[in-house]
Amino acid sequence: MSEKKKYSYDDFWQMHGKQTIWVTRNISYRFGAVLALLSSRIGITPNMISVISGGVTILSALLAAYLGQSNVWAAVVLVVGLQLGYAFDCADGPLARATGQGSSFGALSDKIADLSSGMVLPCILAYASSDYVITVEQTSLNLGLGLLTLFLTVRATLCVLMWLKESMIYKTDRLREDERSKNLWWRIKKGISLYIDEPVYRMALALAWAVSLFWEFIIFYGLGVALITVVYMLSSKKEMDEWDISR
């Protein structure tokens, strides 16, 4: 009987996404490699990790909402829980690739789980926040639902566009280095992209909610994401047209 292969931390670290933004690539994927290593030793599958990732994210938000914004522990739970949830999200892919358990359906399931938990998260925090109300000619208008809808729409749109572009150009090959990495314009765009890097977003969202600036964050971040979405679409068209010509 052949012995089960024993994996090392480096086996999983080498499988991290090469096109990811700095914080995700150098911090979240580091923790993800540790979680992938532990998962391989106790028999947890990539799909199970995807479920754990979404579950930790949503449970952290629910527990923080239960404790309340005025509770310091709510902030601690939210900050730690959201980062841990994302670390698990950075573990399922490397685990699947290193152990040969990856599949197209698994990648789709992971994306659906990520988007679902990512959309539910701000809804829970919005429910646990004060309403966003403005007064127009002595009439109070509750804009919370409208702002949240716009925010979720633009964020989901950007996530889907980025995933589709990666699937088209890189054939979902997360290990491939971006050929434009030495281009100055590409580096500038990557620097700006820190604004939408998932662990940075989660940290900012958690802290904003903890200090009762949730709606201000939604407005500021949502406008930024909308702008980046437009720029991303315009730049992607040029890049993909050039890719079509070079084929």
Image (cartoon, rainbow, N blue to C red):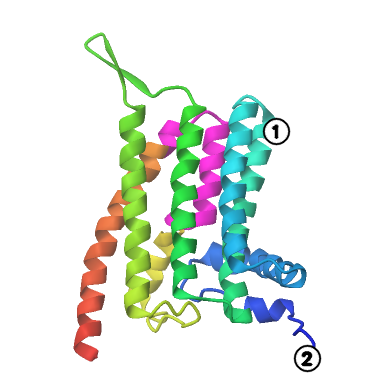
Q: Amino acid at mark 1?
A: Trp
Q: Is residue 23 left or right of residue 165?
A: right
Q: Relative to 225, does residue 246 appear above or below in the rendering?
A: below
Q: Which residue is more in the foreground, 153 or 193?
A: 153
Residue 22 makes an appearance in the image: yes
Label 2 near label 1: C-beta < 8 Å?
no
Q: Residues within 10 Å of mark 1 (few under 14, many from 20)?
A: some
Looking at the rendered image, the disc whose residue lies closer to the viewer, 1 or 2, is 2
**Residue bearing mark 1:** 73
Residue at 57%, 79% (x, y): give it. 97
Give residue 101's position: percent from left, percent from top: 58, 77
Query: Which element carries disc 2, helix, strand or loop?
Result: loop
Q: Which residue is more in the foreground, 181 or 12?
A: 12
Specify the quadrant of the image occupied by residue 68.
Answer: top right
| Magenta part, dominant SS | helix
Give residue 188's position: percent from left, percent from top: 38, 68
Residue 153 lies in magenta, yes or no?
A: no
Q: Which residues are magenta?
A: 195-217
Q: Amino acid at mark 2?
A: Ser
Q: Relative to 145, does residue 95 appear above or below in the rendering?
A: below
Q: Is residue 126 left or right of residue 134?
A: right
Query: Which element carries disc 1, helix, strand or loop?
Result: helix
